[in-house]
Amino acid sequence: MTKLSPSEIEQKLSEIDGWEYQENAIHTTFEFNDFKDAFSVMTRIAFEAEIQQHHPEWSNVYNKLQISLSTHDSGGVTEKDFTLAKTIEEIVAAES
Protein backbone atom coordinates (compact mmCIF):
# COMPACT_ATOMS: atom_id res chain seq x y z
CA MET A 1 0.00 0.00 0.00
CA THR A 2 1.36 3.41 -0.97
CA LYS A 3 1.91 6.07 1.69
CA LEU A 4 -0.19 9.18 1.06
CA SER A 5 1.35 12.63 0.81
CA PRO A 6 0.46 15.28 3.42
CA SER A 7 -1.74 17.08 0.86
CA GLU A 8 -3.57 13.85 -0.02
CA ILE A 9 -4.10 13.19 3.69
CA GLU A 10 -5.47 16.69 4.29
CA GLN A 11 -7.86 16.32 1.35
CA LYS A 12 -9.15 12.99 2.68
CA LEU A 13 -9.50 14.41 6.19
CA SER A 14 -11.97 16.93 4.80
CA GLU A 15 -14.27 13.94 4.12
CA ILE A 16 -14.42 12.79 7.77
CA ASP A 17 -15.16 15.00 10.77
CA GLY A 18 -13.12 15.05 13.93
CA TRP A 19 -9.91 13.45 12.64
CA GLU A 20 -6.55 15.22 12.43
CA TYR A 21 -3.13 14.41 11.02
CA GLN A 22 -0.05 14.62 13.21
CA GLU A 23 3.00 12.53 14.00
CA ASN A 24 2.61 10.38 10.86
CA ALA A 25 -0.90 9.14 11.76
CA ILE A 26 -4.53 10.23 11.78
CA HIS A 27 -6.14 10.63 15.21
CA THR A 28 -9.51 11.14 16.82
CA THR A 29 -11.19 10.93 20.22
CA PHE A 30 -14.72 9.81 21.02
CA GLU A 31 -16.63 10.33 24.24
CA PHE A 32 -19.46 8.01 25.24
CA ASN A 33 -22.03 7.95 28.05
CA ASP A 34 -20.05 5.47 30.12
CA PHE A 35 -17.42 2.73 30.04
CA LYS A 36 -19.89 0.09 28.87
CA ASP A 37 -20.79 2.12 25.77
CA ALA A 38 -17.13 2.83 25.01
CA PHE A 39 -16.18 -0.82 25.38
CA SER A 40 -19.12 -1.94 23.24
CA VAL A 41 -17.94 0.30 20.39
CA MET A 42 -14.36 -0.92 20.85
CA THR A 43 -15.57 -4.50 20.48
CA ARG A 44 -17.41 -3.74 17.26
CA ILE A 45 -14.37 -1.87 15.91
CA ALA A 46 -12.14 -4.82 16.83
CA PHE A 47 -14.23 -7.21 14.73
CA GLU A 48 -14.21 -4.85 11.74
CA ALA A 49 -10.47 -4.20 12.11
CA GLU A 50 -9.86 -7.94 12.03
CA ILE A 51 -11.94 -8.28 8.85
CA GLN A 52 -9.93 -5.46 7.23
CA GLN A 53 -6.66 -6.86 8.62
CA HIS A 54 -5.80 -3.37 9.81
CA HIS A 55 -5.66 -2.64 13.52
CA PRO A 56 -5.84 0.69 15.36
CA GLU A 57 -3.62 1.96 18.10
CA TRP A 58 -6.03 3.03 20.80
CA SER A 59 -6.48 3.79 24.43
CA ASN A 60 -9.56 3.87 26.60
CA VAL A 61 -10.12 5.62 29.90
CA TYR A 62 -13.64 5.26 31.28
CA ASN A 63 -15.87 6.83 28.59
CA LYS A 64 -13.16 8.19 26.26
CA LEU A 65 -11.63 6.35 23.34
CA GLN A 66 -8.56 7.73 21.57
CA ILE A 67 -7.67 6.20 18.21
CA SER A 68 -4.61 6.56 15.98
CA LEU A 69 -4.32 5.00 12.55
CA SER A 70 -1.16 4.51 10.52
CA THR A 71 0.01 1.76 8.18
CA HIS A 72 3.26 0.68 9.78
CA ASP A 73 4.35 -1.47 6.82
CA SER A 74 4.14 1.61 4.58
CA GLY A 75 5.66 4.02 7.06
CA GLY A 76 2.70 6.37 7.26
CA VAL A 77 -0.93 6.98 6.40
CA THR A 78 -2.44 5.02 3.51
CA GLU A 79 -5.86 4.41 2.04
CA LYS A 80 -6.27 1.53 4.52
CA ASP A 81 -6.31 4.06 7.36
CA PHE A 82 -9.08 6.08 5.79
CA THR A 83 -11.11 2.96 5.02
CA LEU A 84 -10.91 1.93 8.67
CA ALA A 85 -11.59 5.50 9.86
CA LYS A 86 -14.80 5.59 7.82
CA THR A 87 -15.82 2.21 9.21
CA ILE A 88 -15.18 3.47 12.74
CA GLU A 89 -17.31 6.54 12.04
CA GLU A 90 -20.16 4.30 10.84
CA ILE A 91 -19.92 2.15 13.97
CA VAL A 92 -19.94 5.15 16.30
CA ALA A 93 -22.86 6.74 14.43
CA ALA A 94 -24.85 3.51 14.72
CA GLU A 95 -24.28 3.47 18.49
CA SER A 96 -25.41 7.09 18.96
Image (cartoon, rainbow, N blue to C red):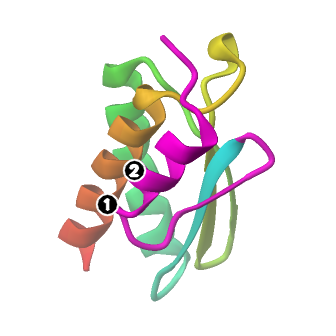
Residue, far right: 23
Left or right of 22 in this view: 28: left
Whole-percent x, y for residue 93 in the image: 24, 70
What's the residue at 39%, 64% (across, down)? 14
Q: Residue at x 54, y 29 (%)?
A: 4
Q: Could you tell me the amino acid type at mark 1?
A: Glu
The amino acid type of the residue labelled 2 equals: Lys
Q: Secondary structure at mark 2?
A: helix
Would you identify the image quadrant in which residue 83 lies?
top left
Give the quarter of the image for residue 63: bottom right
Identify which residue, 32 or 93, lies in the foreground.
Answer: 93
**Residue 70 at x, y = what percent?**
63, 33
**Residue at (66%, 11%) from the top-left corner?**
73
Which quarter of the image is occupied by the C terminus?
A: bottom left
Tell me whether the residue at label 1 lies in contact with that at label 2, contact meaning CB atoms closer than 8 angstroms: yes
- Identify the residue under disc 2: 12
Q: Tell me where the magenta segment starts and ends, as one range.
A: 1-24
Percent coordinates x, y for residue 72 in the rendering? 69, 20
x%, y% of residue 7?
55, 46
In the picture, the disc for residue 15 is 1
Side (left or right) of 21 relative to 91: right
Residue 20 highlighted magenta (yes or no): yes
Q: Is residue 96 magenta?
A: no
Left or right: 90 as drawn, with respect to 84: left
